Image (spheres, grey):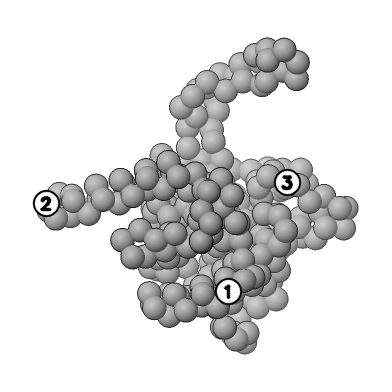
Amino acid sequence: MINKLIFDLEEDMNIAVIFAGGTGKRMNTKSKPKQFLEMHGKPVLVYTLENFENHPMINHIILVCLEGWIEYADAFLKKFGITKVTKIVPGGSTGQESIYHGIKAAEELYGGNHTVLIHDGVRPLINEDTITRCISSVKENGNGITVSPAIETIFLKEKQNNRVGQIFDRSRCEMAKAPQCFKLQDIYEAHQKAQAEGLIDFIDSASLMQYYGHELFTVEGPAENIKITTPSDFYVFRAIMDARENLQILGL
């Protein structure tokens, strides 16, 4: 287990909060949660962490993990040379609570009003350029929400008779993804308010922040930045990684 460390305060740090507290019920896996499923001998979560570990602008990583899997996570951090993780904290009963645990740990360790990048442990296909532009968006606008264009028709479903409700102009629609990035104090205070008001079912950090009046700004991310939720997502991830490896072998 990584011990709590005392750090010298630095200016303008970029702290990744990676939450991997889900049980992966939709993956239908009985032996391991989805974030620990392996591809070519490496857990999905490690692929995700490596994107932040190797990014020159990321100072520290807080990992939010299923409580019963913390020792396992700690072991593979050492095995795969992940050195920027400064604390592993247990997840909560909901995604919102898990994120709050990570944000609270960042605030307790570092204080200040640094940039925090909140990312799913099962989004391993994020890239360096998107992370960089997210950090820039926080510096310029106070936040940055990674998105990708909607590629299917989106409509509201009526409550009765399976009727199609309002159809939205797809050209104006974006799909919120991750990382979702904020000033540490802004997102910490929003979580504190939600806790005090008993609001526990926000779908993501962007929804939480908009609810409390923050104007949000988008950062266009790669289409392949998928969240591995179902078996088909895992196969897509494997196909993309295999294709990248084949291109490297061919020198392309």
- Quadrant in the rendering for residue 155: top right
Earlier sequence position, callout 1 versus callout 2: 1
The alpha-carbon separation of the residues under discs 1 and 3 comes to 25 Å
- For image coordinates 66% across by 21% down, the residue present is 156
Tell me whether the residue at label 1 lies in contact with that at label 3, contact meaning CB atoms closer than 8 angstroms.
no
Amino acid type, residue under disc 2 in the picture: Leu
Residue at the farthest right position = 197
Task: Report, in whole angstroms, how far the alpha carbon at label 1 lies from the one at label 2.
Answer: 39 Å
Residue sitting nearer the eye, 83 or 201: 201
Question: Which image quarter: residue 195?
Answer: bottom right
Q: Which residue was labeled with disc 1?
A: 70
Identified by mark 1, the residue type is Ile
Residue that sits furthest to the front in the current view = 30
Q: Report helix, strand or loop for mark 2.
A: loop
Assign a secondary structure to mark 3.
Answer: loop
Q: Which mark is residue 202?
A: 3
- Residue at the disc numbered 2: 250
Q: Position of residue 180 (x, y in %)?
A: 57, 51
Please indicate whether residue 216 sits to the left or right of residue 234 in the image: right
User: Residue at the spot x=66%, y=65% of the render?
Assistant: 91
Q: How many marks?
A: 3
